[in-house]
Every structure is written in C-alpha cells, then in structure tokens.
Amino acid sequence: MITKRAYRWFVAITLAALALNAILRLIPFDFVWDGHIPLERIRWTPLTFFDIPSNILLFLPLGFGLSGVLTGRNRAPGGAPDIGRRVLAIGLLLGLALEAAQLFMPERVPSVADVISNGAGALLGYTFFRVWATGVGQALNRYVTPVNLLLGLVVYALAAALLTVYLIDRARLANWDTSFPLVVGNETTGDRPWSGSMESLQLGDRCNDPLPPNSSIYYEFSGDGPYEDSSRRGQEGPSLVWAEGPATPQGDGGVTVGPGQWLISHEPPSEFFIYARSCNDIEISAKGVSTSDAAQSGPARIVSISNGLRLRNITLGQEGDALSIRLRTPAAGDNGRKPEMLVPGVFADQRPRDIYVRYSAPMLVVWVDKELHSLSLAPGVVFFANFKQTDHWLITMDGSPHRYNIAYWALVLGTAAAIVAALIMAKRLCGPGARQKLN
C-alpha cells in the first residue's frame, strides 16, 4: 500500500501521460472515413528507427503512474507480478487503440511495432516504479537540491543552445548542386509543364555590395529567343534556349510557355550558385507571371533550378491556385519537399502577378504584388519536420512567420519545466511517510 498523497500524484501522472500520448499520437486529428476500414495501411515494422525509442519513452510515465495507481487501489491479489502483467496489458491495449485510430488519419502510419514498443514502455515504467518503491528513490530526496537543480538547468540550456545552432545550420543552402540548369515552364524531364506567360526573370543574391560578377542574372523576354542575360555585371550568365518549340509565335510582351514549348539554360549558372551557397542567400524575381489554367498541379514548374523530378535547388511552381516553393536544404532534402511551402490564391485568376521570392537562411520572404508572406524555417520547422512520418510536408504561408519557432521554444522551455516538476514531485513522493513497503 502507499499513502493517499502519493496515490494522488500517481493518478496525476497517469492522466497527464494519457493526455500527452493522445495529443502527440493523434495530431492533427484529421480523421477520414471513406466507408471501409483500411487494414492495408498497417505496417509490421516501424516507419523509422526513431519510432521505437520514442514510443517506449512516451509510455514509460504511463506505466510508472499506472503501477502506483494499481498498488494504491490494492486490486492485485497476486502482488507485484500481477501488477506488472496488468500494466503491460493496459499499455498494449492503449497502444492498439491509438494505432487503430491512426488508420483513419492520412498523415499517420499505423504499425504493429509501435504497439509492441508501447507495451515495452509501460513495462519499463513498471520497472521504474519498483525501483522507486524499493528505496532507490530516496536518493532523489538527498540530491534534488536547489543548487543541483540550477546546475542541471544550466546543462540543459547549453544542450538546447547546441541543438538550436544545429537546426539553424540544417536550413542553409550547403547542399546546393552547381550543375543544375535553369528551366522555365517545365522540368528537365519535360513532364511537369506549366502553361502561362512571363515578362522577365531575375536571379540574384546579396552576398556583397556591390554585387560580384555573375551574382545576378536578368532575362527580359522579348521576341522569339534565345534569351540572353542582360544584367551587364561582368561575365554573362547562360542563355535560355528553347528545349521544345516554340509552338506559338512569341511577341514583345513576354514569353509564353506550355506543353511542347519551354526554356532551359544551355549551361548551368554555376558561379551564381556558388555565391548563393556561400552566403545562404538567393532571390528570384519574376514579373508579369500569368497562368493559363488555375487548376494546374504537380506542381507545374514555373521556374526551376533542378535536374529531374527528385533533384533540385529551388523550384517555383503552381499547385492549383497556390504558388508552390520547394527549396533544397540539408533538412528539406534533395527534393525540397519537407517542407514544401504554399502561398494560396496567387493563381486564382489569370491576371499578371509580380512574384518576388527571397531566402536568406533561415527566413523565406515572398512578395506577390504588394502582399507579403514570410516564414522562418529554423529552428522550428526543421525540428518538427523530423517527426513527420512521410517525406512530404505542406506548409501554407498564411499565418505567423514564427509560429513554428514559438512552438519549438515552448517545447524546449516546457520540457525543462516538466523535468524540474517531475524531480520535485519525485522528492515529495519519497518524503517521510510517502512510501510503505510493498508485497
């Protein structure tokens, strides 16, 4: 038996663990029912290796709290072994219920391995309870002092700072490939065409002032092409030539691209990429951009620095009425889909738009005419991307630019507060009269 004070703490731990597991495992609560149970979505193995330790850790406090609750209620005639079996059974059943709920969530991947990991976590929590109950927990009562807590917080703050620096570094342009060509109106493979028109295109960076040679490339689309770099900043950038077409005559008011007529640079603007990569800064300005079809998707490539469907540095595309931005960083991957940013409503009609995109790591800024959209990609976005179970994450740029950073720091500070609270709570549980000998 345990005291009433300790029992209340164990109930609180159990309820908090239940709430935490429900929130983390079922976010964003977007359940979809299409008339059948999609059992084919069930995996036997975990989606990633990190799923195993994370599922064990999530259920550890639940197993610890349940062990205390069951002991306090004295409903286990078989003593400690029976309590352990009950904790294991409850952990497996709860894990099974959560995975069953994930069957109806498109962003989640249910796994039998997750259920087993949950049971293991609950059983580990029971083991920790036994350690506490047999007297090892009294050490907390001796060593959890204000000085030691302060020292622990200092160590935690240093670890959090190192993690933050690492996450910001993962949002740089360090993995840009200097061999990729510049493409307008399609992908290099020719199977992601965009139907529309554009008056001019400029690529630049802000590494130095004045800009060094070849750090800015400007194309004014007039006539049938090929289109030369007219930036006049020393060495000229590569020409844009027709990879296919043109199937329709081009006028002086811009270039029209679509299936069968799109542009590609005759060589990659390698020097420009080197400058952009070295200072982690790139800007793309496309003026007079007008779509011919508000339902294009893929995304349909408007401007792309890429080599095929899965290798790119940056791509501006159209996904329905939204402007799509894929940006290659060590965190986002070679395809720049984790995350892929969307600016909604840009192509809701066919009127020409002036689009300006600048990425100065880790801040992405998008101007559509006079409307500003921005998003900080680190540390928050990079951190939460690691918990996505697929290689594609869509983020709509219509909220606070720092919303993911706020969530990240709330988690960092909240974790520190939870650790301190848990240590203080454990000290109270180990105080005089809080523990009695168990069977």
Image (tube, grey):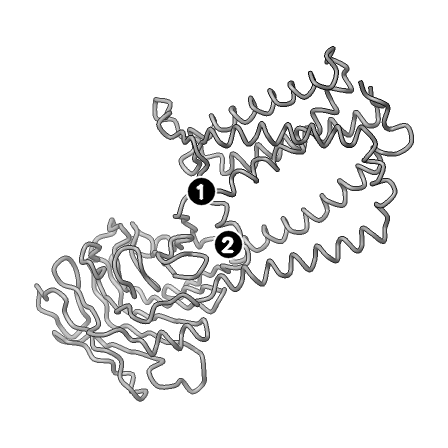
User: In which quadrant is the N terminus drawn?
Assistant: top right
**Residue receiving disc 2:** 381
Q: Is residue 390 left or right of residue 69?
A: left
Depth check, mark 2 against mark 1: the one in front is: 1
Left/right placement of residue 270 relative to residue 157 reads: left
Q: Which of 65 and 302 is in front in this view?
A: 65
Q: Residue at image x 42%, y 53%?
A: 339
**Which residue type does callout 1 highlight?**
Gln
Q: Quadrant of the C terminus?
A: top right
Q: In this view, does 261 lie above or below 399?
A: below
Helix, strand or loop at label 1? It is: loop
The label shown at residue 361 is: none
Residue type beneath disc 2: Val
Residue nearest the viewer, comparing 352 with 271: 271
Name the residue located 65 percent from the left edge and 18 percent from the top edge: 86
Residue 35, picture quadrant: top left
The residue at the point 13 percent across, 63 percent down is 261
Q: On the rendered structure, is 177 left or right of 94?
A: left
In the depicted structure, whether residue 66 falls above or below residue 342: above
Q: Do the residues labelled 2 and 1 touch (CB within 8 Å)?
A: no
Circle 1 residue = 389
